[in-house]
Image: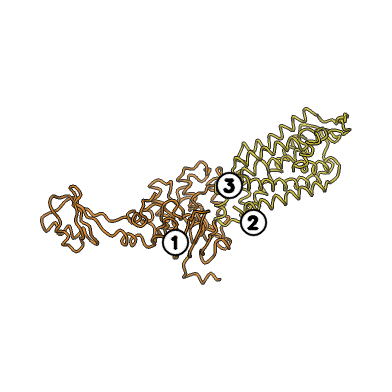
């Protein structure tokens, strides 16, 4: 197999992946492809099989059935061929307590064929002041950022980030998102495992929603929302009957919730409702639209809340 | 090679940053040796045992103990330091993280073994310097032979250390098992009471423990009894068997 043959193919291919731990099936007939340069999300609750799937791709677990390939290479059979080309941030992983930040980066840089200058990573991930601190003395967020930086020190073509922002404060999460987008903009393919809806929505080009070991949906966040959640809801407070709004093409149904009038529909509902109200001399100040979120989509797809 | 060097140097620093382990592994044997030197002194005894054996092989007690305590330095590193260290790497996911970075297992074990050689050599040197500085004792009669035997002894305990690190379920268990084995060996293998005064049961147990072979392998050339190829062979066997078992145990995980 030559590497050139894979240039236009998928960066990652998973076909009918199956993995069980004793009687518990963790991943059941999962197939998907990840394209070059995209941020691909695996979204699901704890125990949905996301981490097991990614660990099979990282060469850390042997699938019971099916095939996986990363950059056209079987990660279990030929880990040495992926050395430096794949970066991993594992969920349950620590470094030795007394290892210093710079020592960790130095070690992982030594393991890579073409490492980047880790001082840039220290700077990017806000760890410059901590370069001589021991891993055991770092805060949860600092540890997490170091583990992500370690995944990037080999300047990988593919990077796996498993629950990258868990334990980060909101500001650090936003910074991380920007950094991940910058990594992608440099051409790196990113596989992001997350149970945060906002993260998947904000970052991912495509999302595979996993539940109970299977993929229940796979598409762009926008299309996932449009396909399953459907209705846009426009609300305002007013007295009286507004059933007449259903005459508008974009409004399917009108309801009332206490003082609130609710108009459900599709497309630019708020624009049409506002115009129709204005025509009748009504201009409610609290007119607002609520778009369905990925959270609602997830709820509909899986029948339960994310935990 | 560069990776191996970086990792070995980093691991050495990590060990030296564990003051408690270092003090216990290096300090405790040294204190024991100095106590034994004060109690039994540097002149050979002329009172044979009931079986007609001369305690301490008929040599000055301290000359008997110094090569033994050099062997003990290797045991301290292999039993006390390495197992807890490696099993905590396993438990905390450090090994998995290394594997995810495609760091070959041979590099990880290679650097652990290099670290054991360096630390054991430091421990042995400490015993040597302390005893020759404080006491007036004869130089080893075959320093080269003793050094070679010490290297075999380190290899055997390196393999034992890696094996314990592979099979012990947790760092606590590894630490406990390591210290227990260390104390038992210290008492029975010619680094506590002289072998000649021990009962035959104690001697049989001692013969089953790796340290007694390390002690004798170093003691024989040191005291002028010549190279002991049987003991060197036993040490090699321990190194090979434990090394293979450790590799299998790590591969299974």
Query: For mark 3, does the 10 Å Cα neighbourhood hold few (<14), some (14 to 19), or many (20 or more) residues?
Result: many
Query: For mark 2, does the 10 Å Cα neighbourhood hold few (<14), some (14 to 19), or many (20 or more) residues?
Result: few
Q: Earlier in the sequence, mark 2 or mark 3?
A: 2
Q: Position of residue A256 (x, y in %)?
A: 19, 51
Based on the displayed image, in which of its 4 quarters is residue A217 positioned? bottom left
The residue that label 1 is drawn on is A186
Q: Position of residue A231 (x, y in %)?
A: 26, 58
The chain shown in orange is which? A
Label at residue B89? 3
The residue that label 2 is drawn on is B1
Q: Residue furthest top?
A: B39
Q: Position of residue B129 (x, y in %)?
A: 74, 37
> Dot 2 falls on which chain?
B
Which tint was used for chain B?
yellow
Based on the displayed image, in which of its 4 quarters is residue B135 positioned? top right
Query: For mark 1, does the 10 Å Cα neighbourhood hold few (<14), some (14 to 19), or many (20 or more) residues?
Result: few
Element assignment for label 1: loop
In this view, the residue in front, B208 or A71, is B208
In this view, the residue in front, A256 or A93, is A256
């Amino acid at each position: 197999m030559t590497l050139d043959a894979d240039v236009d193919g998928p960066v990652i291919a998973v076909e009918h992946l199956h993995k069980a731990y004793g009687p518990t099936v963790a991943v059941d007939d999962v197939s998907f492809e990840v394209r070059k340069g995209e941020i691909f999300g695996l979204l699901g609750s704890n125990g949905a099989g996301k981490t097991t799937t990614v660990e099979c791709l990282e060469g850390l677990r042997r699938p019971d059935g099916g095939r996986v390939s990363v950059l056209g290479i079987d990660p279990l059979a030929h880990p040495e061929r992926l050395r430096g080309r794949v970066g991993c941030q594992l969920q349950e992983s620590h470094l030795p307590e007394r290892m210093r930040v710079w020592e960790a980066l130095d070690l992982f840089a030594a393991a890579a064929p073409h490492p980047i200058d880790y001082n840039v990573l220290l700077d990017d991930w806000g760890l410059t002041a901590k370069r001589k601190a021991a891993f055991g003395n770092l805060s949860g967020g600092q540890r997490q950022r170091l583990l992500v930086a370690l995944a990037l020190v080999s300047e990988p073509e593919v990077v796996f980030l498993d629950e990258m922002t868990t334990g980060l404060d909101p500001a650090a999460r936003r910074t991380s998102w920007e950094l991940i987008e910058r990594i992608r903009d440099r051409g790196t393919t990113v596989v992001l495992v997350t149970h945060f809806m906002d993260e998947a929505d904000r970052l991912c080009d495509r999302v595979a929603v996993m539940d109970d070991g299977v993929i229940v949906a796979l598409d762009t966040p926008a299309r996932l929302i449009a396909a399953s959640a459907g209705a846009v809801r426009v609300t305002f407070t007013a007295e009286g009957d507004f059933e007449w709004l259903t005459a508008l093409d974009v409004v399917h149904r009108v309801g009332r919730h206490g003082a609130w009038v609710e108009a459900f529909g599709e497309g630019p509902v708020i624009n049409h409702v506002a115009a129709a109200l204005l025509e009748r001399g009504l201009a409610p100040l609290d007119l607002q639209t609520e778009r369905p979120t990925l959270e609602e989509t997830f709820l509909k797809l899986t029948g339960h809340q994310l935990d | 090679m560069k990776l191996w060097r970086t990792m070995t140097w980093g691991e050495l620093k990590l060990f030296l940053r564990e003051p408690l382990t270092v003090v216990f592994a290096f300090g405790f044997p040294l204190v024991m040796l100095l106590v034994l030197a004060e109690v039994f002194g540097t002149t050979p005894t002329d009172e044979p045992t009931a079986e007609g054996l001369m305690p301490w092989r008929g040599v000055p007690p301290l000359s008997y103990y110094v090569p033994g305590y050099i062997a003990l330095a290797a045991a301290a590193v292999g039993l006390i330091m390495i197992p807890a260290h490696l099993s905590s790497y396993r438990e905390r996911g450090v090994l998995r993280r290394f594997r995810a970075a495609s760091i070959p297992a041979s590099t990880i074990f290679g650097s652990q073994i290099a670290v054991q050689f360096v630390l054991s050599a430091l421990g042995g040197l400490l015993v040597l310097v302390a005893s020759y500085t404080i006491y007036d004792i004869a130089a080893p009669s075959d320093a080269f032979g003793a050094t070679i035997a010490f290297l075999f002894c380190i290899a055997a305990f390196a393999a034992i250390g890696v094996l314990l690190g592979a099979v012990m379920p947790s760092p606590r268990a590894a630490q406990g098992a390591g210290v227990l084995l260390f104390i038992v060996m210290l008492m029975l293998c010619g680094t506590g009471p002289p072998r000649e005064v021990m009962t035959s049961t104690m001697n049989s147990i001692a013969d089953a423990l790796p340290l007694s072979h390390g002690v004798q392998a170093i003691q024989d050339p040191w005291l002028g009894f010549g190279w002991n190829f049987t003991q060197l062979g036993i040490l090699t066997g321990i190194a090979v068997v434990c090394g293979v078992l450790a590799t299998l145990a790590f591969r299974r995980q």
